Image (tube, rainbow, N blue to C red):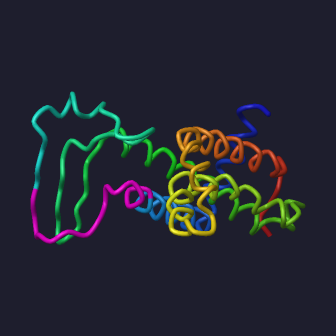
Amino acid sequence: MNKKIWLRKYKKIKKDSKAKFVGVLVMILYFFSYLISIDHLFLQEGIFEVFIVDNPLERMFMSRAPFIWEPIAALTISGVRLFVSPLNLLVGGFIAVLVGINIMVAVFGYRYRKVCRIKSRYGLMGTLPSMLTGFACCAPTFLIALAPALGSFAVYFITIQPFLIPLSIILLIGGLVWSVRQLPIEFEKT
């Protein structure tokens, strides 16, 4: 598929205000849920406080777990505390953008499935990779909560956790490419 076709499809999707609204909303919600899942955003007493570590450049690259780095600052505003880690913000933001764009394309494809001759089950299939990115952070925690029944699975998911974020990014990009390819080249809004 050449660049002009991709650009034409992107412009059509971008003009759809409902798809764009849902995509941006999901992007924002995903970003905040990502920060909450890695314990970088939570409620804390206090009105306003800023704390910066001594060696921020050195500490910024210290890894706590696969794809989770040490924070270099803490910011509290009106009882909400954010640990600032540039690399975590970058990873979370990148995945959130991919999730939002995938959802935007999925909503567009679902809304225009009859016009575009897309079978409805395939229109929403583009959301599957975005669901899998949530799996990268939340599934091990969910399984640990169900430890008596599913304890052996938790160990399995914890061992594969380092591969889930890169796999999720690959699946999101692949899902985006696949979803956009499913849209016909020429279509008009009815």
State which region is magenta: 34-49
Residue at position x 28%, y 41% in the image: 70
In this image, 161 relative to 84: left or right?
right
In this image, 137 relative to 62: left or right?
right
Quadrant of the image occupied by residue 20: bottom right
In this image, 111 relative to 146: left or right?
right
Residue at position x 48%, y 44% in the image: 94
**40 in magenta:** yes
Task: Name the image quarter holding the C terminus.
Answer: bottom right
Residue at position x 18%, y 34% in the image: 56
- The outermost residue toward the top is 58
Residue at position x 19%, y 71% in the image: 79
Residue 8, percent across and down?
A: 71, 45
> Which of the pair 95/67 is nearer the observer?
67
Quadrant of the image occupied by residue 67: top left
Up/down of 163 relative to 180, above or below: above
Residue 86, percent across and down?
A: 31, 40
Task: Name the image quarter holding the N terminus.
Answer: top right
Up/down of 10 relative to 107, above or below: above
> Which of the pair 158/69 is nearer the observer?
158
Up/down of 2 relative to 97, above or below: above
> Which of the pair 68/87 is nearer the observer?
68
Residue 7, percent across and down?
A: 67, 41
Q: How many marks?
A: 0
**134 in magenta:** no
Quadrant of the image occupied by residue 104: bottom right
> Which of the pair 80/93 is nearer the observer?
80
